[in-house]
Image (spheres, helix red, strand yellow):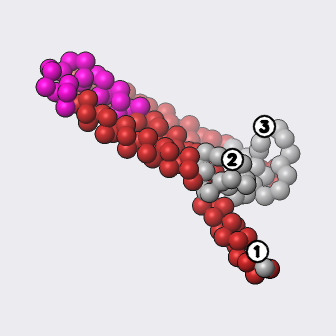
Amino acid sequence: MQGTYLGLLFLIVIAAIVCGAMVTLSWLLGPKKKTPYKEAPYECGVTPVGDARERFPIKFYLVAILFILFDIEVVFLWSWMTAFKKADTNFMVFSFFELLGYMATWVVGYVYALHVGAIDWDETTSLAPEKLGKKHNADEQKENVA
């Protein structure tokens, strides 16, 4: 039994030695002099303009989170379809109603995301979190003027 994994252990040890040797050799033989070019961010050959650590609007994070949620939904649906295909009748009925509840929850979340403007990139109609403060302040300023 132990001999079966001996080849795998040998492969892991050799891979670790090769990786360690490559890192060590590049550290020993590589240039050590710091230049302004090494400190600057590289963007496909284009000279960078401004700071490299700019803040991204929250819209990008909202879209990323919605994308991840959609991916998770697809994973759950895929596993459900696989189990549904091989199930008996009683499980099919229960599983179908379970799926309807799951999809209803997902659709409510999606409609809410549309309502608050998480996907709407128009500045004037969005109710996304970064816009709520601006709209509230604008409403207060209108009341103060009147």
Please tell me whether residue 110 belongs to the stretch shown in magenta.
Answer: no
Q: Residue at x 73, y 78 (%)?
A: 143
Could you tell me residue 84's position as x and y percent? 25, 23
Disc with the residue nearer the chain's start (3 vs 1)? 3
Label number found at residue 131: none
Could you tell me residue 108's position as x and y percent? 43, 45
Q: Which residue is mark 1?
A: 142
Q: CA distance from mark 3 to mark 2?
A: 27 Å
- Type of amino acid at the residue the image marks with label 1: Lys
Q: Secondary structure at mark 1?
A: helix
Please tell me whether residue 79 belongs to the stretch shown in magenta.
Answer: yes
Disc with the residue nearer the chain's start (3 vs 2)? 3
The answer to whether residue 29 is above or below residue 133 is: above
Q: CA distance from mark 3 to mark 1?
A: 47 Å
The image quarter in which residue 86 lies: top left
Instruction: Please name which of the two marks, 1 or 2, marks the residue nearer to the observer.
Output: 1
Disc with the residue nearer the chain's start (1 vs 2)? 2
Front residue of 4 and 64 = 64
Could you tell me residue 121's position as x and y percent? 69, 47
Dominant secondary-structure state across the stretch colored magenta:
helix
Q: CA distance from mark 1 to mark 2?
A: 25 Å
- Residue farthest to the front, as pictured: 146
Q: Which residue is mark 2?
A: 121
Region in magenta = 74-94
Q: Which residue is mark 3?
A: 44
